[in-house]
Amino acid sequence: METNKSELLNEGITIALDEADFALLRILQKDATLPLGRLADKVGLSKTAVWNRIQRYHATGVINRQVVVVDPKKVGISETFFVAVRTNNHNAKWFAEFIKIISKFPEITEAHRMAGHIDYFLKVQVKSTREFDLFYKSLVKEIDLFDVNSSLSMEVLKNETALPL
């Protein structure tokens, strides 16, 4: 197959991806449990070629982990809050401490450093608004923040884990 869509750089390792790679990755993003034979049939390669490609994706970090996606509501996680954080501290020591602190909170399922007037954006998933209040109090007790603004998600309109390859 011809390399035409992308070259990825991961920690000094360059990997060229062809159309078969992208087709395989699109399929794996939707269902990583498909047997090699079905994957091979879908992308028009042998089972060995598919297995080798998947091993290469893992070795180069194209696939960095495989997980099960759990429906939050079915396990009692019914509230999602988005928390916009601004800080007066923009030094490396504060940043390292911030990462250390947010890593302690399993309720924070995503954390992003932002460009613009918001410094950090957190996705927080909890069982109730009461639980969010307890989380919030614990967070602000642990680290100095200039401004925190929280918004409750009323309804999920789209939630994809697959990248648009």
Image: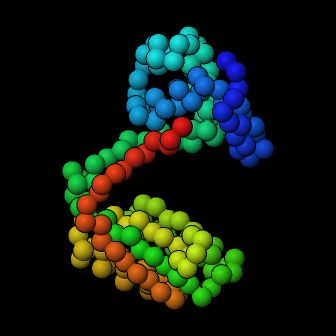
Residue 9 pos. (x, y %): 73, 43
Q: Is residue 84 above or below residue 43?
A: below
Q: Position of residue 131 (x, y in %)?
A: 27, 73
- Which residue is found at the position 22% from the left and 58% from the top? 76
**Residue 98 spot, x, y in % from top left:** 56, 75
Residue 40 visible in the snapshot: yes
Colour scheme of the picture:
rainbow
In the rendered image, residue 25, in percent from the top left (x then y), is placed at 53, 31
Q: For the C terminus, which image quadrant?
A: top right
Front residue of 63 and 97: 63
Q: Is residue 36 visible?
A: no
- Residue at image coords 61%, 32%: 57
Quadrant housing the N terminus: top right
Residue at the outermost right position: 12
Q: Quick check: 153 above or below 31?
A: below
For image coordinates 52% across by 89% down, the residue present is 146
Question: In the image, 129: left or right of 4?
Answer: left
Residue at the (30%, 66%) spot, across then down: 153
